[in-house]
Image (cartoon, helix red, strand yellow):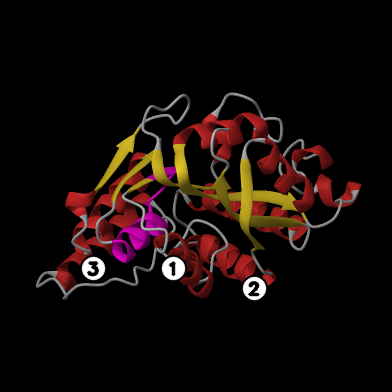
């Protein structure tokens, strides 16, 4: 992540940089340092989302599958009285989130917890963030997990609160050729279209306050940033023992990206819970 909230330079920054370079040489490419968000989300959209969500004055924020919790931290910045909890199973991402919270002076208002979201007792909260992580809320495989995930999100949000759901959808039905180039076993049934996705949210006890979708530019920026660290490292270390593995992963991901480019979308749904549901 390229952190937009930076503090003063550490006095040992030059040594740290050299040490990091030595570590990269020994261990392999760095991981996702070019990404601010782990998804197709621009600064402009993030600002609009945070402003809209903070206007509801949440006191508690729950981030499901938080990763390093960039969006949650921005909400806490914008809602000074709020406290947040992020849950994920990736220890490296959680550590990154804790470091970012410390730099921003938010460490006393946020907790990053390494645990499963299935059946979580962390709610209810005033604001629940679930961006690209609905599959973490149950055992069913996508897209059959969505009704259960939406019911869980309704359970986890207080009446009068908000849920921000980031969820994949098809812009149009993918062709057989496109599906063959995507993830293993890709099927047209893996996602709904946007209208069906919104209707599932309504059936689960929500009303859609705001419906929007990532643009092609946001997707291109995300996908480029996702591979940038690896590609630059491979160019500098073609003979490294870990280069063949890293090269194969990067080449496979790039190929898949161009199979779903313009076909797979990501919706950002701001959902209002229906009282009593």
In contact (CB < 8 Å): disc 3 and disc 1: no
The image quadrant of residue 114 is top left
Picture coordinates of residue 214, whole percent (x, y): 64, 64
Which of the two discs, 2 and 3, sits closer to the camera? 2
Numbered disc in front, either 3 or 1:
1
Helix, strand or loop for disc 2? helix
- Side of 101 where 147 appears, left or right: right
Query: To which residue does mark 2 refer?
Result: 217
Among the two numbered marks 2 and 1 on one chain, the one whose residue lies closer to the N terminus? 1
Is residue 276 visible to us here? Answer: yes
Query: Closer to the N terminus: mark 2 or mark 3?
Result: 3
Check disc 1 and report its element: helix, strand or loop.
helix
Disc 3 from disc 1: Cα separation:
35 Å
Question: Local crowd at mark 2 within 10 Å, few (<14), some, or many (≥20)?
Answer: few
With 36 as the anchor, is 41 left or right in this view? right
Depicted 118 relative to depicted 274: above or below:
above
Q: Residue furthest left?
A: 11
To which quarter of the image does residue 41 belong? bottom right
Across and down, in percent, residue 215 comes to 67, 69
- Reading the image, the residue beneath label 3 is 17
């Amino acid at each position: 992540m390229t952190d937009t909230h930076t503090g003063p330079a550490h006095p040992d920054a030059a040594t740290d940089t050299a040490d990091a370079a030595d570590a990269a040489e020994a261990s392999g490419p760095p991981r996702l340092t070019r990404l601010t968000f782990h998804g197709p989300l621009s600064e402009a959209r993030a600002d609009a989302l945070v402003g809209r969500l903070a206007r509801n004055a949440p006191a508690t924020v729950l981030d499901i599958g938080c990763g390093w919790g960039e969006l949650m931290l921005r909400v806490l910045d914008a809602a000074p009285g709020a406290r947040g909890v992020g849950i994920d199973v990736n220890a490296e991402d959680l550590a990154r989130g804790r470091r970012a919270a410390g730099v921003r002076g938010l460490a006393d208002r946020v907790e990053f917890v390494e645990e499963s979201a299935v059946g979580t007792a962390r709610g209810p909260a005033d604001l629940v963030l679930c961006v690209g992580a609905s599959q973490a809320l149950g055992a069913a495989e996508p897209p059959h997990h969505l009704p259960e995930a939406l019911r869980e999100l309704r359970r986890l949000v207080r009446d009068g609160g908000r849920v921000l759901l980031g969820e994949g959808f098809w812009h149009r039905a993918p062709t057989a050729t496109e599906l063959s180039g995507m993830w293993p076993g890709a099927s047209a049934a893996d996602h709904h279209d946007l209208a069906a996705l919104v209707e599932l949210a309504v059936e689960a006890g929500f009303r859609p306050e705001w419906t929007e979708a990532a643009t092609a530019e946001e997707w291109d920026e995300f996908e480029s940033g996702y591979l940038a660290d690896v590609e630059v490292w491979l160019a500098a270390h073609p003979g490294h023992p870990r280069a063949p593995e890293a090269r194969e992963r990067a080449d496979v991901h790039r190929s898949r990206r161009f199979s779903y480019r313009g076909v797979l979308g990501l919706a950002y749904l701001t959902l209002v819970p229906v009282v009593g549901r």
